[in-house]
Each structure stands twice: as structure tokens, then as C-alpha cells.
Amino acid sequence: MAESVLEAIRNGNWDYEPPTVDKKDYDATSALPGTEEKVGLMAARALKGLPLWHPDDRSTFDGNLS
């Protein structure tokens, strides 16, 4: 598994760029932006070395996805 941004910082790798991850390799979420559910999911992604945002994550409060 890829180094997470947290591991990179801990190791002094200040110019860390995570590897590109295909959106098919991790799940999108319909959690509302700013909710505990969304923040928790983003934290879990960071710990796994995944991008914080998925292109298909919910991005509005009006019920629409993306």
C-alpha cells in the first residue's frame, strides 16, 4: 500500500505527492460535505494513502451527486 500523507510528514517527506489512484479502486460517498460521516471517510482515505476526494463524491447539499 502507498505511503499516506501522514506517514510522509512523519518521515520528513515535505514534498510528498500521493500516487494517482483510479476512481474505480476506491468508493465514492453520498455523505454530505462537512458532516462527521464525510470527514471520517476522508480521514480513513488519508490513512490508507488514497486521495481525500473521489470525483463522484457528493459535492452539494441539494440532494444531487457530483
Image (spheres, helix red, strand yellow):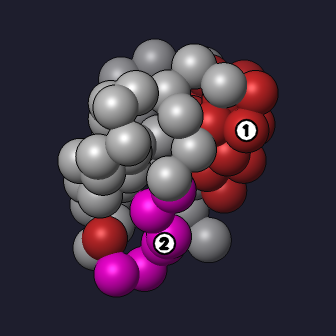
* Residue 8: quadrant of the picture: top right
Q: Residue at 46% of width from left, 18% of height from top?
A: 14
Would you call the spot at circle 2 few (<14 residues within 10 Å), some (14-19), or many (20 or more)? few
Q: Give the range drawn in magenta.
A: 24-29
Q: For residue 26, which numbered disc appears in the image?
A: 2
* Residue 24: quadrant of the picture: bottom left
Q: Main secondary structure of the magenta part?
A: loop
First in residue order: circle 2 vs circle 1:
2
Task: Return the residue at label 1.
Answer: 37
Residue 47 drawn at (x, y percent):
71, 46
How far apart marks 2 and 1 lie (CA) works out to 16 Å
Q: For residue 53, which numbered disc appears in the image?
A: none
Residue 12 drawn at (x, y percent):
60, 20
Q: Residue at 66% of width from left, 25% of height from top?
A: 35
Residue 11 drawn at (x, y percent):
67, 29
Amino acid type, callout 2:
Tyr
Would you call the spot at circle 1 few (<14 residues within 10 Å), some (14-19), or many (20 or more)? some
- Residue 60, placed above or below residue 12: below
Asked if residue 24 shows in the view, the reply is yes
Foreground mark, 2 or 1? Answer: 1
Would you say residue 2 sits in the magenta stretch?
no
Q: Helix, strand or loop at disc 1?
A: helix
